[in-house]
Amino acid sequence: MTGLIQVRGGRTVAKAVDRPWLLRAASIALVLGLWEWGGTIPVSIAFPKFSETLAAFAGMITDGTFAGAYAETAGPLIVGVSLTAVGGVLAGLVMGLSSRTEWLGLPVFIVLQASPSAAIIPLITFIYGIGFTAKVFAVVLLSAPVIVLNSYRGIANTPRSLLEMGDAFLAGRFKRIVKIVIPAGSGLIFAGLRLGLAQGFTGAVLAELLITPTGVGDLITFYRSVADYPRMFASILSIILVASVSVTLLQRLEQRLFRPEMRPA
Amino acid sequence: MTNRTSPTSEPTVPGGVRNPGDPAVRVVDLAKVFAGGVRALDGVTFDIPRGELTSIIGPSGCGKTTTLKIIAGLLDATSGQVEINGTPVTRPGPDRAFVFQDFALMPWATVLRNAAFGLELRGVPRKEREATAREYVAKVGLSRFEDAYPHQLSGGMRQRVGLARALAVDAEILLMDEPFASVDEQIRRKFQEDLLRLLSEEDKTVIFVTHSIEEAVYVSDQIVIMTRGPSQVSKVVRPGVDHSGGSGHIRRSPAYLDWVERIWAELQGYLET
């Protein structure tokens, strides 16, 4: 592959392809550069420069603002995502293995995935009030469909030849599921978990914005109300960073547990 | 030629005395109709002699693989039955191991784990199964690749892993579904020779599905020629090619070429219909 690129595009491209981190860093630098430039125009008085946001970000780490806010947000997020991860993967597994359950459960999750969740969240308060349970429910509502549907697809699409191989070599039902079906579907299951975690973050923050102002959602609302836009953007940036790091860690966990062949050399 | 025996004949094992002359596998009046009414097999009957390599050859759609999968217990027959040592087949069993056309290797497992997987499923302790798998991985010539993953191997190497997995469980009967279909001609010839060498060291009954007449004549003690429309056995022949003279000598020998032509003539009639 590298050789081919060298012939076609010269040495520089080949080197860049050999070092993917260089391209990633360049992509991030480009976005941040555009952000800095957008802040100097300025696009709006509510749009701070990247450097201002970064300074606010550092300040919020050192004065403990983030620590306090994330301690509050983490509760419903961890409980919600954990519940959905276990329940969602199990639901996907059962739906993928049994056509009756598939027809019973699949339409519910397809409708849930297509529904505008932000519009449903205020309804949660009618049932669960404005406390911890309501926020957990918001996280579950957003993360469940993607986890269930991806797990279902992962399980239902186990290669037929691997299933036949399991039968031919006398795998019982349990070993067939644990040693063949789950590892074969782990790619999609973990893709669902990663997306579900990201959706869980959205759910947690939406709940804090729409139900009761606490945690990181409260930071955004508060700094917007006092027009401290660098801190408001730093709060948003922190959500993106925390979500990205969590998703990457989950990907590493998947490779360690199920797909060692995909581990980078 | 088919030595057809009544399905009611007395079972030779378990519990009974196995006569070396008894076939290892009897396929008796096998029929298979798939959902939608597609008739894949229609009264297929033949015997597989013990300790020999029998090829099943025929045009696409004649039911070769279906027959093999029914023998393996992976498919149910609509009527008729398969007997292994006199016992009717109802499901896969430890007396049979399967080599798949598309290798059926687990992409997330190393060569060694794939080769040991049959033993793993049977609950053999890790050290023991890895030692056995290591032995067969070496026999198929992949010692240096024990820790490699399937995507790092060529098609021929992947099929060697499939063969090592099947040999590692030490089944009496080896079922091979077009094992060389996905490899190129050079690798295929080398693989055929390696297979014959390996089988000469192992006491196995082999059923080998292939499209290739040359391959069937080269590797087989017996060839079951199947036809389609209806899918039945046309002939069972025993080429008896002498393997003592080496590959090049065999492939140029008049006996070998004559058998290739005779089987081609047999199949040609059905291809034109």
Image (cartoon, coloured by chain):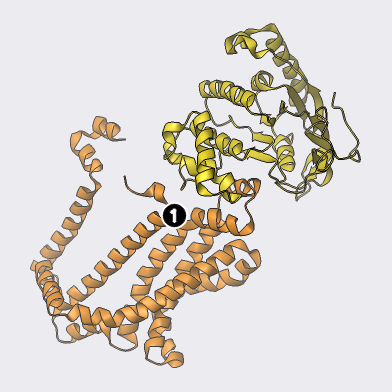
Chain colours: A orange, B yellow
Question: Which amino acid does the dot numbered 1 rest on?
Answer: Phe
Instruction: Find residue B245 and report its image quarter.
Output: top right
Task: Say left or right for A4 vs B152.
Answer: left
Q: Residues within 10 Å of mark 1 (few under 14, many from 20)?
A: some
Q: State the residue at coordinates (9%, 71%).
A: A55
Chain name for mark 1: A
Please give the residue where the numbered disc 1 appears in the rendered image. Answer: A258
Task: Say left or right for B73 vs B196.
Answer: right
Q: Position of residue A40 (x, y in %)?
A: 8, 67
From this view, report whether residue A25 is shown above or below residue A135.
above
Q: Position of residue B131 (x, y in %)?
A: 51, 40
Secondary structure state at the residue bearing disc 1: loop
Q: Position of residue A93 (x, y in %)?
A: 55, 64
From this view, report whether residue A129 is shown above or below residue A198.
below
Instruction: Find residue B84 and report its image quarter.
Output: top right
Instruction: Find residue A43 and report its image quarter.
Output: bottom left
Viewer-proximal residue among B245 and A57: B245
From this view, report whether residue A195 is shown above or below residue A165.
below
From this view, report whether residue B153 is shown above or below residue A36.
above
